[in-house]
Structures are given as C-alpha cells and as structure tokens.
Image (tube, coloured by chain):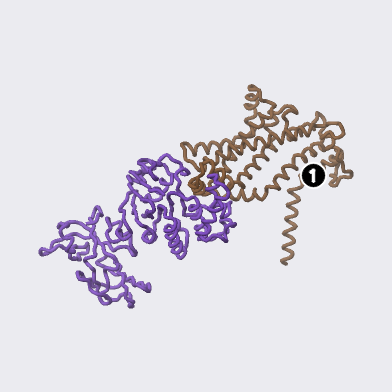
Chain colours: A purple, B brown
Amino acid sequence: MAEVKLKNITKKYGDVIAVQNMNLDIPHNEFLVLVGPSGCGKSTTLRMIAGLEEISGGEIYIGDQVVNEKDPKDRNISMVFQNYALYPHMTVEENLGFSLKIAKEDKEEIETRVKEAVQILGLEELRKRKPSQLSGGQRQRVAMGRAIVRRPDAFLFDEPLSNLDAKLRTQMRTEIKKLHQKLKTTVIYVTHDQVEAMTLADRIVIMKDGVIEQIGTPLELFEKPATKFVATFIGSPSMNMIEAKITNISGELYMETNDGISVLVPKHKINSLAEGQRICFGFRAEDIVPLKFGQKPKNSWSLKSKVNLAEPLGTETLIFTNLGNTEVVSRMFTPELVNSNDDLEFALNLDRTYLFHGDTGLAI
Amino acid sequence: MKQIKKIAFWLLVLFLLILICLPGIWIFVSAFRPNPEILSKPANWIPDRWTIHQFTQMFSINGYVSVPAFKYLMNSVIISSVSTVIAITIGMMGGYAFARFNFRGKNSIFLSLMLARAVPGISLSLPLFILFAKIGIINTSFGVILVYVAMNVPFTIWLTDGFFRQIPKEMSEVARTDGCTRLQAFWNVELPLAGPGIGAAAIFAFLLSWNEYALASIITRTVHSKTLPIGMMDYLDEFTINWAGMCAIAVVMIIPALILTFIVQKHLVSGLTFGGVKG
C-alpha cells in the first residue's frame, strides 16, 4: 500500500552516467512499465528502487519515507528476477516461506500465507519439489509466489519473461496482469519488449541513454509519440521514418526526401514548419496501404512502387516496398495475395503522418 | 576380439592400480611384521609371522612406550583441525570478498596471495624459527597452527573465490529483497550453495596440515607439540632405523586421512569440478 516517488535520481558509474535526473511519480496500485533498449538505465533504475544499487544523487520515496539509505530488507518490496533466482537447495514451499521465516513469523502464519500463494498460482502439486525439478514457467510462478507471500508495498519485476519461450511468455503475461488486478499493489516492471509494455502497463516510461523520453498510457505513446525514438520504438512493425527537407513549390510546402521525392505537408502541420527546415516524417505501416485492396483516405498521397517482399501473416500481410531508396513497410488487412515484384499503387494517409525535428528528434 | 581387448584393458588398469598402491601396501604389510623380516633379501612379500607388536608398544598397551604415538596423534588432530577451521573461516570470507566486491587493488592483492604460494615453504624455516623463538612460541601447537593457517589461507581463498563466482549474484540479491541482511543472505543462501566447494577446500587444508613435515620439524621440539610425521622420526636412532615402527606410525597417519577422504569424496569431486570451470 504505497506510492513510489523518484526525485532527480541520478546514477553514475565513474564518469559514465547511467541514469540522469529522473523524476517519476508512481501512484498506489499502478502498473508501471519501464521500457527501452538495453543499456538505457531501466534495470539500474529498478535496482535503485530495490536498494541493490547505490544512488548517486536524488531521492527515492516509498510511501512517505525517503529510502535512499535503507537496506533492501527494510524497504518492504519484492523483486522477481529474469533468471528466477529460486533458492536451489530449498523446496518450493521453503522458497515461498523463506522471507517469513527470516522475519520470524510463527509457523501457522507462514503456512497460511504459503498456502494462499500456492492456491493463487496453482502450485499445489509442486510444493515438495526442488527448483531443478520444475519447468521454466513453473519456476517463474514460484518466483512470483515468493514475492506475493511477503505482501510487499511494491512488486519489482526485472524482465521476468525474457527466459521463457514465446507461447509461455504470452500466457504468463496474462497471468501477471490478472495477478495485479487481484492483489491491487504497485507494480514496477522492466522489459525491453514493447509488446509486453503495451499489454501490461497502466503507464509506460520509455527510456533512452539514461533519460526518460516519454511517460504516458500505452495509447498516448502510440498515438502521440513525443520523439522520433518513441515513435519507432512503440508499435510493430516499427514506424517508417524518412528524412526530408521542407521546400516551397509555388506557394505550397512540400517535404522533399533525399531522393528528390516530394510529399505535400499535411495541412495541420503547415504553421509549425519553415522552408529549408530538416525534418523526419514517419507513418505507421497501416497508414500506407495498396489502393487496389483498400479505401483511399481523404487526405492522401500516392506512391507507385514495386513490391520487394510480401509476408502473409493470416489476418494481415506485410508488404515491403521502396519510397525512393528507403524501404518502407505497409500493412494490409485484406486477405489478398501479393507477390514480390508486383507493381502496386500505395496511398499514404497524410492525416496520420508524424513529423519530427531533423536534429533533436522532437515531435513537431 | 572385442572380449580380448576388454580383458587387456582391465589387466592394464589392474597393473597400474597395483603400481600406484604398492608403496601403501608395503607400508601396511611392514607395519605388521618384525623388523628383520623387512630387511630380508630377496624381499619377503607375505610376512611369515604377523604381529601387532609395534602398535601395542606405540600405544603403551603393555606398559612399555616406544614412541608416544597417542600424544602425537592428538597433537596432529588438534593442530590440523584447528588450523583447518581457522583457515577455512578466513579463506571463505576472503574468497567471498574477491568474488563479490570490487575494491581498490583487488587484482594485485589476489596476485600477491597466489605468489605467496610460490615461495617454497622450507625457505621460510629459518626466519620463522628465529621469529618464533624470539616471541616464545617455538615448540607450541599455537605456533604450528599459525604457520598452517598462513599456508592454507591463500589456497582456500583461490578455491572458494571460484565457488562463489559460480553462484549467481541474484541469489544474494533476492535474499536481500526477501528481508535478509547481507550476512543472513550469505549464511542462509550462498553458504549452503557453496557447501561442497568449501568442504573440498577444507579437506585440502586438513590434509596439507596433516601431512606437513618440513616446517613442523623446525618448529616442534618435544612431545609437547610434535605431530605424527615428526614423531615418525623418533624411530630413527643413531645407528639403527626401526622400519617396522615407522611403518606402523605411517599406518596410523594414513587411516584417518583415508576415512575422511572416503566420506567426502563425492563432494570432493563435485566440489572440484564445480569450481573447475571458473572463468
């Protein structure tokens, strides 16, 4: 039952800055996901909250207390690690009850709480087994059980699903979500997988090079990316991104790519642009579709191009084609057969293009 | 053909085994026969007359004491066990520190500890003798224990460092988020996991102390502190050597070491291979 606050948190390893001036308010009961490429400082942040990593500057609050100087054991948090980190010399129930034993709870209390966790996670059959006799998914479940038993103020997950195969990962993802709904506790979850972030989070924090790029709900990040990095990181396949320069052709602003292709600037962006400015314009795969199989959007720009490759995925087909010399991907939801080397006409929905500053990468 | 190959193989194994065990067998056999028979030429492999004379004399069972073997045995047991316990305690903590913490001069300290092992022990005998004589711990068990601890600590550090490195550091981290102090995490989680390795290190330390001769021969002077290997020399007189007595005391020395090794050999192997893949 606690909120977690980070105030100007900084972490330095010698001269290397791993996390810089991070500010974050995590209200009680929120499922917050820290996401970013490896080395962006997300795990370091989590470890600082846990108390496993010293803080170089700033303050961390759990509840009303500053916990900077507190040992991990006094922070009342539970952490689930990527490699499960179950105690190999203890059985499942000993693993689950370990924290209570250390806290010198009486035997009956330990038994009831272990029983409770075992029921929530469906581990009844496995109570007497050692971790080496469990499968990956079962181990992950025990690791979560161990965290539940403590009844912590906050759960910290450090890439808990990365070691599982794809199918199990989807299944455990759902279980974690359900668990959060049941337990109603603050969860801070670190992952490099944007799909995990999108499906689990109440709010997502995207980090890059130790700095927060954007904080928002999954849909906010998807619809209104604050930077070019966020735009390409969230969503699969990645947003198409093309470098261009603003030019004025007989009174109208165009985005001219390096290959000399000109695309009309979307109307609602005209006022924020100046001639000669370098920009990047991005659009998602579903916003450029083959005209033949779809409806033409109201404000569109058309591109005739050859198909490089088509990947039929059942509900959708990914079509790779070229815009100038840059390869772009289009996502088509009609189940039509498209072959490599087909000549197609694509329609780009101009209302759904994103513009970013050429050098800063900030959204325009 | 296959069968012949198999038989040849096992014959070779048997031959090598006998070759390795021969000195041990000879000691054992010689301990149970009269001295003259040992010196007979050609060698008499199977004694004509078995006797436990040397043992009864050694342990003064019939009132006559040849060599105070029981006192030596006790000295050996006390010195070896105490020095092992101390060396393992210190070495284990050192190994843990080297495996888990970063501190200034870590590599140089580790290297110098290993280099210390390269110094031949016997070269330290004179300085040790003078030093110990000056501070008055010559001919005491304490002095011998001190030397053995110093000998064993670097090796124990090296061995346990490897074992602790094998244990993922998340083990201690998860224990700490589970409410343990660093020491509790070590005691409840990391120590049990490193158990086989530490056991192996302990056996090595114990056997080294149990068998050590060179330095003990300098430091120990009387029955007060002499260990079994030094006590063996009591059978060396000016003009005669009591080979049978020597062999008997050797048997007394070998048996506890053998039993100990048998008990822990499973752990010993797993411990050694466990630490063997240290990167």
Which chain is indicated by disc 1? B
Asked whether A111 or B87 is in front, the reply is A111
Does A5 sit above or below residue B78? below
In the picture, measured across the screen, residue B145 lies left or right of residue A105, that is right
Residue neighbourhood size for the residue with mark 1, other residues' Cα within 10 Å, grouped as few (<14), some (14–19), many (≥20): some
Residue at screen point 69% across, 30% down: B141
Asked whether A54 or A112 is in front, the reply is A112
Asked whether A97 or B149 is in front, the reply is A97
In the picture, measured across the screen, residue A254 lies left or right of residue A156, that is left
Amino acid type, mark 1: Trp
In the picture, measured across the screen, residue B53 lies left or right of residue A343, that is right
According to the image, label 1 marks what residue? B26
**Residue B63, horizontal then vertical, whole percent:** 86, 31
Image quadrant assignment for residue B258: top right
**Residue B89, horizontal then vertical, whole percent:** 60, 38
Figure label count: 1
Residue at screen point 80% across, 30% down: B237
Secondary structure type for disc 1? helix
Image quadrant assignment for residue B28: top right
**Residue A104, horizontal then vertical, whole percent:** 55, 44
Residue B69 appears anywhere in the view: yes
Does B263 sit above or below residue A217? above
**Residue B211, horizontal then vertical, whole percent:** 70, 38
Q: Residue furthest left?
A: A250
Q: Residue furthest top?
A: B134
Quadrant placement of the C terminus of chain A: bottom left
Residue B189 appears anywhere in the view: no
